[in-house]
Image (spheres, rainbow, N blue to C red):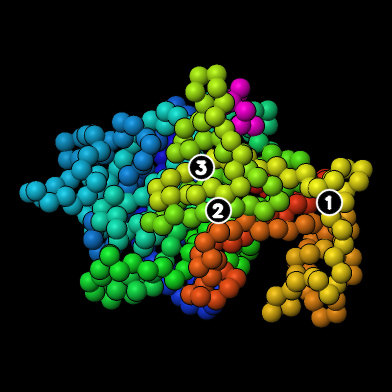
Amino acid sequence: MAEWLLRATEGFLSTPDGNSIYMWGFGQSPGPTLVVTQGETVTVTLANDLPEPVSIRFPGQEGAEAQGPGGWEPSAPQYEGSRLVSLVQAAPPGGSMVYRFVAAAPGTYLYESGTEPHKQVPMGLHGALVVRPADWDSVSSRTAYGAGTGTEFDREYLLLTAEIDPELHLAVQRGQAYDAGAFKPRYWTLNGRCSPDTMSPDGAAHLPWQPYGAMIMAEPGERVLLRYVGAGVDGHPLHPHGNHARVVARDGRLLRNGAADLSHLRFTVLLGAGQTYDALFRWTGLGYTPENPIPTLVPNLRNLKTGEPQWTMWSGSPYLGYKGDLPKGLTSYNEVGEYHFMLHSHEEPQITNWGEFPGGLMTMIAIFPPGTLMPEMGRLS
């Protein structure tokens, strides 16, 4: 049995342009990633510290129940007369509600508030659920969907997208009305952060409400599982540079019809509201081999693009593990000469922070020299 306590509360999200956004969340933004095993009974207790009813629904989990006054009952829409007030049973202000379900199928899922979702979900009441296959073993059987499914991986990363309309958050903070039809995002987040904060490590001290980073790190040839979760209301065309990714599952369901493998390579994944995708990414590089690690020619220093802060994530050399000379006055963020290339949204406004580029739905993929990346990187606990 897996048991979780989630507390719906308020906090403030920091953005790289110095703004501070009033948020709701399950103790953080986004909520804690719930990692369970197929076949487990999952029990989630919701404690509500917010001034209005809050609930949690678990899309993709059949047979979910809530503990009502008379005991356990199926999670179901709640009405006041003919008016729908919540998609599932809610916890009143200052109260609690307990939910349970059996994690019957492996995959990547979303959880979110089912009460006034047009407001509460954009306010931050959402998170991700990862169900491991029944034969999961962190050493001998690291797969997304079980042995024989072609979903073996060496490292995994979760990327949860959301949007922020500061007008909505300000209205909620002040207790004012807000027209959901006027929703207009100004910030876009990966794992609760806007770029370049997406590249800060997990648990960064300057982001106490946003504990999850979104930096992807791997070594050449490793199989990297990217778990995409669309927690917002917009669609996001996400694209990793360096290689196509093989989409192996959607909405927690393996892309297979009997013996037919329906997985496919995609340049861009259009992640819709409430959707999840599992994709396998692998980097080898043009011409790269362990004996000849030269994926590209060295660019002329005059062609080296650097940002206004005068820093770069280019090692100065195409050789993995070697850091070449950089122009004077530049600061390198490379640790051991690793390569960096982007993973970002292809919708340009989504890679800004209130119009300032770069920002928003953007992070980096870092390819480290073989044998230099710590084994614990890219492991969801």
The foreground one among 50 and 192 is 192
The dot on residue 295 is 1
Can you give x and y, in whole percent of width and height, for residue 18 in the image? Answer: 52, 79
> Which amino acid lies under the numbered mark 1 shown in the image of this protein?
Pro
Q: Is residue 151 magenta?
A: yes
Residue drawn at the location 74% of the way across and 73% of the way down: 306
Q: Quadrant of residue 338?
A: bottom right
Residue drawn at the location 75% of the way across and 71% of the way down: 305
> Which amino acid lies under the numbered mark 2 shown in the image of this protein?
Leu
The dot on residue 320 is none
Q: Which circle's residue, 3 or 1, is located before the other in the chain? A: 3
Task: Tell me the SS state at disc 3.
Answer: strand
Query: Where is mark 3, residue-wise?
Result: 277
The foreground one among 239 and 84 is 239
- The answer for how far apart the CA atoms under marks 2 and 3 are is 11 Å
Graded by Cα atoms within 10 Å as few (under 14), some (14 to 19) or many (20 or more), the crowding at tag 2 reads many
Q: Which residue occupies the extreme right position in the image?
A: 291
